[in-house]
Amino acid sequence: MRITLNQDPEAVTEARENADLTKTALAKAVGRSLSLISEIEGGTRNAKPDLLESIAAVTGVPVAQLKAQDA
């Protein structure tokens, strides 16, 4: 069964890398675990809207840029 994701995993990774953050640094900045960030970027976990908003704020991108196209 395929998980319907709120986020575009590649967009989350790109935003993090463009902000010059490691996964560990992003996890710390948004108050979440490294494993959760890894799973979100890997597309195996869904990011809740509040987490996407936090990631957008930390990386300096609009939240819409992180969302899946069909979400």
Image (tube, rainbow, N blue to C red):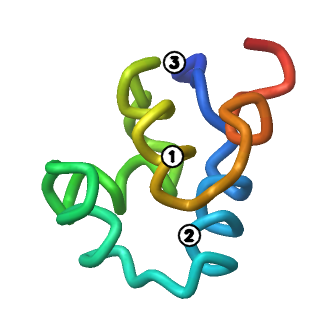
Which mark sits nearer the N-terminus, 3 or 1? 3
Q: Which residue is mark 2?
A: 16
Question: What is the distance, in whole Å, between disc 1 and disc 2 at their CAs?
Answer: 11 Å
Residue 59 pos. (x, y %): 56, 61
Residue type pointed to by label 2: Arg
In which quarter of the view is residue 50 placed? top left
Which label is found at residue 57?
1
Q: Which one is in front, 24 or 35?
A: 24
Residue in the image at 69% along x and 40% along y:
66
Where is 29 relative to 53, above or below?
below
Q: Secondary structure at mark 1?
A: helix
Q: Which residue is mark 3?
A: 1
Q: Is residue 15 above or below residue 62?
A: below
Toward the top, the furthest residue is 71
Which mark is nearer the camera, 3 or 1? Answer: 1
Q: Residue at x 25, y 77 (%)?
A: 24
Are discs 3 and 2 less than 8 Å apart at CB? no
Residue 71 image offset from top left, x and y in percent: 73, 12
Q: Are marks 3 and 1 in contact (CB under 8 Å)?
A: no
Q: Earlier in the sequence, mark 1 or mark 2?
A: 2
The percent coordinates of residue 47 (x first, y second) are 42, 30
Going 17% across and 49% down the picture, which residue do you hit? 32
Query: Mark 2 Cα within 10 Å, few/some/many (few <14, many 20+)?
Result: many
Residue 14 x %, y %: 70, 68
Q: Amino acid at mark 1?
A: Ala
Alpha carbon distance from label 3 to label 2 = 28 Å
